[in-house]
Amino acid sequence: MLHAARRASRPAGSEVFQLPPPNVGDLIRIARSGFLASINASNFAGHFRNRNMTDNENKIECMDSLIFGLNRTAEWRKKMAVRHPSDNRNTRANSYLMKLANEASQLSDEDFLQLEPYCALNEPWRDCVSKAARHVGFTHKIKDFPSFVEHLLEVLNEPIVS
């Protein structure tokens, strides 16, 4: 289905409409129906360039969100270490979290593809990153960034209890 036209921001009284970039699948269906005379690689070049740029921006946003969540939890663990000096797990968790935050900037494409469907969920995503980060230093299975991503995916797929 083609995207609906949306009004571009123009001066009052101007009736100019702007269409968002087309979906490739829609263009192919239209072409097969005989509506367009010809479709070639040049028709799609801009769309794919925009798609790759968007994917890269999404990956950067995902990395930034992970780094922010890990650093925020590291700061919280630092405060917990002061509050509970006899529990050395908080100090250990703080250092692990800071290490993971540094490693998050090297998010692999494979890990990103697994996380991408969840990154845009905003509030639920941030809650799950926070929950997974709170387990660092307290759950022995989180040893490095790939194991953190694995644990985060488990948290993201937990059933929601209301």
Image (tube, rainbow, N blue to C red):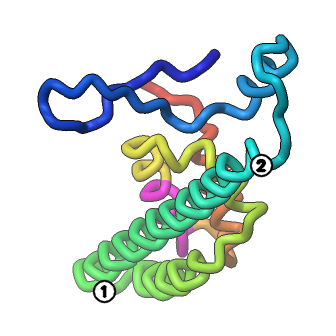
Furthest-left residue in this view = 12
The quadrant of the image that shows the C terminus is top left
| Left or right: 89 in relation to 13 | right
Q: Which residues are magenta?
A: 129-138
Q: Residue at x 48, y 30 (%)?
A: 19
What is the CA distance from the residue labelled 2 to the residue labelled 1? 64 Å
Measured as percent of width and height from the top left, residue 81 is found at: 32, 82
**Residue plotted at (41% across, 52% down):** 126
Residue 111: x %, y % from top left: 72, 61
Apparent side of residue 69 relative to residue 21 in the rendered image (left or right)? left
Above or below for 20 versus 55? above
What is the three-letter code of the residue carrying label 2?
Answer: Ser
| Residue shown at 53% from the left, 67% from the top | 60
Q: Residue at x 38, y 70 (%)?
A: 73
Q: Which mark is residue 42?
A: 2
Mark 1 = which residue?
A: 85
Q: Position of residue 70 (x, y in %)?
A: 45, 71
Residue 130 on the magenta segment:
yes
- Residue nearest the observer in this picture, 66 or 95: 66
Residue 151 visible in rendering: no
N-terminal of the pair, mark 2 or mark 1, is 2
Q: Nearer the viewer, residue 104 or 147?
A: 104
SS class, disc 1: loop
Numbered disc total = 2
Near mark 1 (Cα within 10 A), the count class, few <14, some 14-19 or many ≥20, is: few
- Front-most of 66 and 94? 66
